């Protein structure tokens, strides 16, 4: 069985979470909704359907959901020229690939957004597989995305690590019985990430790369067969 590193993209490899917060804020305002931006940011990392439930409440009229999500997509696309990969992002993917990990992007982004982000990341030579919104029925924190990434990578849950930046990433990984390594670059604190189940928390992918020998990601042979990670 391969050892798989499953990477969230938004907020983990690319500095996008606050652009998403702005895009959702403006999209919601078009339909008369004005929640605090902090509330919106707190739901970033969820799929759009779950985000709207959290921000607007589950008992609302859902008739606007598709239009609001479409507005968010259009507004976020305005920021594509301003997107940037975090320092160390491409280097980390390439180093893990060199060490024998199978690299899968586990993103719930639309195919269009994921393609734009992959161009910015510029590390396709290190990426084996990728998932997107079309690959799942339920979005994070449901475990569907992690299951889809596992299926594409060919790994068992005990032979994989999920790298993300939000509590929703950690919760989705935990439900799929995959250990999670978290970074702080999405704007969520260490306490929240650990409470959600993160095994490790790093300031960012650059620190993770610099301290790789101290991480569960150091040696893929420990994950070649299903089992609990050892750190």
Image: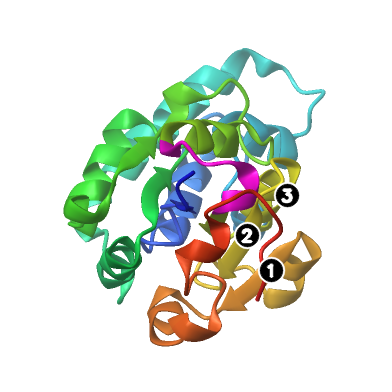
The answer to if 185 sits in the magenta stretch is no
For residue 48, the mark is none
- Please, what secondary structure does the residue beneath circle 1 have? strand
Q: Earlier in the sequence, mark 1 or mark 3?
A: 3
Q: Is residue 122 left or right of residue 43?
A: left
Report if the CB atoms under discs 1 and 2 are less than 8 Å apart: yes
Q: Which residue is mark 3?
A: 174
Where does the image place residue 218, in percent across and percent down from the top left?
Answer: 47, 75
Where does the image place residue 206, in percent across and percent down from the top left?
Answer: 38, 80
Return the residue nearer the eye: 148 or 52: 148
- Please, what secondary structure does the residue beneath circle 2 have? strand
Where does the image place residue 17, in percent across and percent down from the top left?
Answer: 47, 57
Q: Earlier in the sequence, mark 1 or mark 2?
A: 2
In the image, what residue occupies the spot 45% across and 62% down?
Answer: 12
Tell me the distance, in whole angstroms, between the alpha carbons under discs 1 and 3: 10 Å
Return the residue nearer the eye: 179 or 117: 179
In the image, what residue occupies the spot 79% across and 27% down?
Answer: 58
Q: In the rendered image, is residue 222 in sight? A: yes
Report if the CB atoms under discs 3 and 2 are less than 8 Å apart: yes
């Amino acid at each position: 069985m391969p050892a798989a590193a499953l990477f969230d993209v938004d907020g983990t490899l690319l500095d996008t979470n606050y652009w998403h917060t702005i895009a959702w804020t403006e999209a919601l305002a078009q339909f008369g909704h004005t929640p605090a931006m902090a509330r919106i940011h707190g739901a970033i990392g969820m799929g759009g359907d779950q985000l709207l439930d959290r921000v607007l409440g589950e008992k609302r009229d859902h008739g606007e959901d598709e239009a609001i999500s479409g507005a968010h997509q259009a507004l976020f696309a305005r920021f594509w020229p301003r997107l940037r990969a975090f320092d160390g992002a491409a280097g980390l993917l390439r180093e893990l690939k060199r060490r024998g990990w199978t690299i899968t992007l586990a993103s719930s982004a639309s195919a269009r957004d994921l393609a734009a982000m992959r161009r910015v990341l510029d590390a396709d030579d290190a990426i084996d597989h990728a998932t997107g919104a079309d690959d799942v029925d339920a979005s994070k924190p449901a475990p569907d995305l992690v299951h889809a990434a596992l299926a594409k990578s060919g790994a068992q849950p005990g032979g994989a690590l999920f790298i993300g930046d939000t509590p929703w990433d950690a919760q989705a990984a935990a439900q799929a019985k995959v250990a999670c390594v978290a970074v702080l670059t999405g704007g969520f604190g260490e306490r929240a990430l650990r409470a959600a189940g993160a095994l490790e928390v790093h300031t960012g992918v650059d620190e993770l790369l610099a301290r790789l020998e101290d991480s569960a990601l150091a040696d893929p042979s420990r994950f070649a067969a299903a089992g609990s990670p050892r750190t």
